[in-house]
């Protein structure tokens, strides 16, 4: 039996989370809608959050590129209804001019 070589899916970042809780909330929302999610942490073990300060975020939420628009809509709808949660997030596609 030969090893399987599968291509990695084409992923797009739909959100940068400032903490692990925001990332977990986003993951739960998207998985609940049937959207596959991968959370990529920027953290380095034993460095107690230094990468959060350096990168400006705790990590990012990635989804298959073909589902990125749907994922952004799910997240936008949730954070419109829960504005107290929105400041914990950043949009990797937003520009300073657009804010």
Image: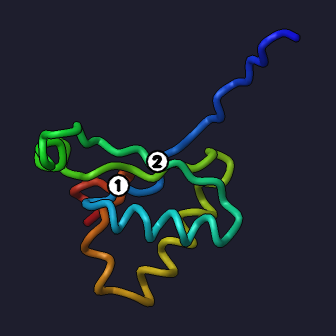
Residue 93 badge: none
Q: In this rendering, would 92 be left or right of 8?
A: left
Secondary element type, mark 2: strand
Q: Residues within 10 Å of mark 2 (few under 14, many from 20)?
A: many
Q: Is residue 66 left or right of residue 89?
A: right
Q: Residue at x 19, y 43 (%)?
A: 55
- Residue 55 vs residue 66, the one in the foreground: 55
Q: In the rendering, at what x and y percent does residue 20 appear?
A: 32, 60
Q: Is residue 36 left or right of residue 73?
A: right
- Quadrant of residue 91 within the rendered picture: bottom left
- Give the image location of residue 30, x and y in percent: 58, 66
Q: Position of residue 15 (x, y in %)?
A: 41, 57
Real-space CA distance between mark 1 and mark 2, rounded to the nearest whole angstrom: 7 Å
Identify the residue at the far right of this view: 1
Q: Quadrant of residue 4?
A: top right
Q: Which of the image's four quarters has the N terminus?
A: top right
At a point 70% along the width and 24% down the height, the residue shown is 7
Do the residues under discs 1 and 2 have CB atoms within 8 angstroms? Answer: yes
Tell me the crowding category of disc 1: few under 14, some 14 to 19, or many 20 or more residues within 10 angstroms, Cα based: many
Q: Position of residue 40 (x, y in %)?
A: 41, 44
In the image, is residue 38 above or below residue 96? above
The residue most toward the top is 2
- Could you tell me which residue is drawn at 32 percent across and 80 percent down? 85
Tell me, for residue 13, which label it has, or none: 2
Quarter of the picture containing the C terminus is: bottom left
Residue depicted at x 47% and y 55%: 14
Q: Circle 1 is placed at which residue position?
A: 16
Name the image colouring.
Answer: rainbow
* Secondary structure beneath label 1: strand
Closer-to-camera residue (87/19): 19
């Amino acid at each position: 039996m030969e090893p399987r070589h599968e291509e990695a899916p084409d992923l797009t970042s739909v959100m940068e989370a400032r903490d692990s809780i925001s990332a977990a909330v986003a993951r739960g929302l998207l998985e609940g809608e049937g959207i596959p999610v991968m959370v990529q942490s920027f953290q380095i073990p034993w460095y107690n959050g230094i990468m959060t300060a350096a990168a400006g975020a705790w990590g990012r939420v990635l989804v298959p590129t073909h589902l990125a628009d749907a994922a952004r809509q799910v997240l936008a709808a949730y954070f419109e209804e829960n504005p107290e949660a929105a400041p914990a997030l950043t949009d990797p596609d937003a520009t300073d001019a657009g804010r």
